[in-house]
Image: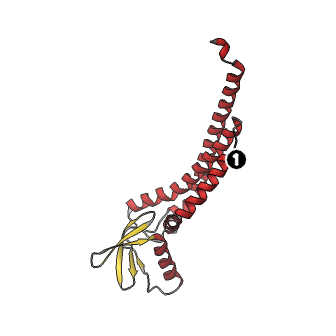
Amino acid sequence: MQGLIDKAAVNEFLLKAIAAISVAIALEAFGLLLVKLIERALKGSLHSRDGRDMKWQIIRRKRLLALPQLLIRGSLLLLAIFIALEIFDLPIMPFAVWVAITSLVAVLVLRRLFENAVACYMLMLEDAVGIGDKLRLGNCWATVEHVGWFATRLRDENGLTRTVMNSSLMELIRTAESGSQSDVAKAAS
């Protein structure tokens, strides 16, 4: 039994494993540093207008910080996988091609979802709309009840609930800010 195990191969594997673990720890520390830097960069955007709902403030802050953290973690995970493949002398190109094709297909298939998620992030970053705000959509006023990653739920003066995709809401708000404020008017309640 002793002769079947090559001690040199086991030692080499253990050295590679220790190197991979060291790289993972270093990347995790680097990720934490980047998150702190992003939090510091977003500090001005994390404050909001007076009169905002405190629950909304907590949700907004969490969402504003979650997306950069997710992107950093995902990027560092990919980097760690590439480094691990290199450390263990495994082919990198098939994995890189798979990642590229999968990312391209995901972006093409989920384009509308990405547009609405980015619009939500921009609306929150600019503090353009929040829970309790009143928006004028065409002829009627509506109160923002919920701002989701993809859509915003509004309740109009007649009690009807309307769901507006965030990319459409962002266009309406930008139009109102750049020109006349007749399409969308905002008022904190």
Q: Which residue appears farthest toward the left when viewing the image? A: 158
Query: Relative to 177, is 58 above or below?
Result: above
Residue at 60%, 42% (x, y): give it.
28
Q: Amino acid at mark 1?
A: Met
Residue 175: horizontal and vertical position, in percent?
Answer: 51, 82
Q: Quadrant of residue 165?
A: bottom left
Count of residue discs: 1
Q: Quadrant of residue 54?
A: bottom left
Residue 186: horizontal and vertical position, in percent?
Answer: 42, 78
Residue at 49%, 72% (x, y): give it.
167
Query: Relative to 51, is 61 above or below?
Result: above
Which image quarter is the N terminus in? Answer: top right
Residue 146: horizontal and vertical position, in percent?
Answer: 37, 66
Q: Nearer the viewer, residue 89 or 189?
A: 89
Q: Nearer the viewer, residue 35 or 41?
A: 35
Residue position for label 1: 93
